[in-house]
Amino acid sequence: MVAAGATVGTCAALNTGATYCQDGVDGTVCEGCNSCCSRLCTPYGPSGVLVCQPASGCHVNGDLCREDSDCCGAAGTGLPGDGQVTCQKEAGKALGICRNPTGCNPQSNVCHYQDYACSISSARNDCCGATGNSGVCQLDTLGVPRCNGLTACVPAGGICSSAMDCCDGVPCVPDPSGVLRCMVPPDAGKVCVPPGGACTIDGDCCVGTTCIKEVGAAQGICGNVTPPPDAGVPCAEYGQLCTTDTDCCNQVSCYNGICQWAVPQ
């Protein structure tokens, strides 16, 4: 908790409320996937400490938020489950949590999945568009099990909920008004967000930068990482682009051009 105008703060108790995820918000130390709201527990950057990995784009059930628009299922997207999730905050508090959906699990919320980085995801099996073992629950590019009720990928510039929605593997990042949209790439192929560009997670940013944002916010800016002491090349954070395993921090694999903990099934 950081006071207005301050640069440091104190550790505070996590927000509570109507959610299937009680404690495992983005970045908290974890021992297994199911302790995390994102259902993915993997090493953090150069430290190697296991933390709950943030999911790209909108914030999933139970994660911290500042506005309704931070959450998967917020009103106004036109995506499956639109309007079924709000940011639940106590009176006078700046931070809240993305509460349980009022109906089916919206686009990009976490869902029930077996045999990925963990044996099974404890999230409910009720994605909008199709329930049960219908194939709508899929692993995103980082290995997070998420609902995908779309019948076609979203083209560059279209509204999205996460990078999983977008065609050609481009990031899903905020536009100038804060609406999540599939990034318009400068050329064909996979791209990353350069320094100063909008982001939702470190994986959106080019190697050597991370996504700098307020706690709970879905929108940040890719900023420079402090250079390593030996002035060497910085390793790629979880979710960032790579060409070989040696590009990635903490012996994380480079799979399909992205640093991630386990090869998707």
Image (cartoon, rainbow, N blue to C red):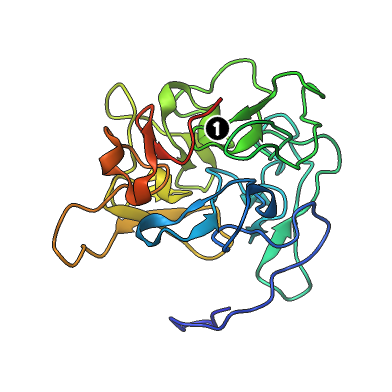
- Residue 236 vs 262, above or below: the answer is below
Which residue bears the numbered disc 1?
140
- The foreground one among 75 and 24 is 24
- The foreground one among 260 and 164 is 260
Q: Amino acid at mark 1?
A: Asp
Q: How many marks?
A: 1
Secondary structure type for disc 1: loop
Q: Is residue 21 left or right of residue 254?
A: right
- Residue 171 vs 231, above or below: the answer is above
For the point 56% across and 33% down, the residue is 160
In this view, the residue farthest toward the top is 151
Image quadrant occupied by the N terminus = bottom right
For the point 36% across and 55% down, the residue is 210
For the point 72% across and 54% down, the residue is 62
Residue 54 rendering spot, x and y as whole percentages: 54, 50
Quarter of the figure with residue 118 = top right
Camera sees residue 215: yes
- Residue 146 vs 212, above or below: the answer is above
Camera sees residue 197: no
Residue 244 rendering spot, x and y as whole percentages: 27, 34
Residue 208 rendering spot, x and y as whole percentages: 26, 52
**Label 1 crowd bin: few (<14), some (14–19), many (20+), radius 10 Å:** some
Q: Is residue 247 left or right of residue 10?
A: left
Residue 58 rendering spot, x and y as whole percentages: 60, 45
Image quadrant occupied by the C terminus = top right
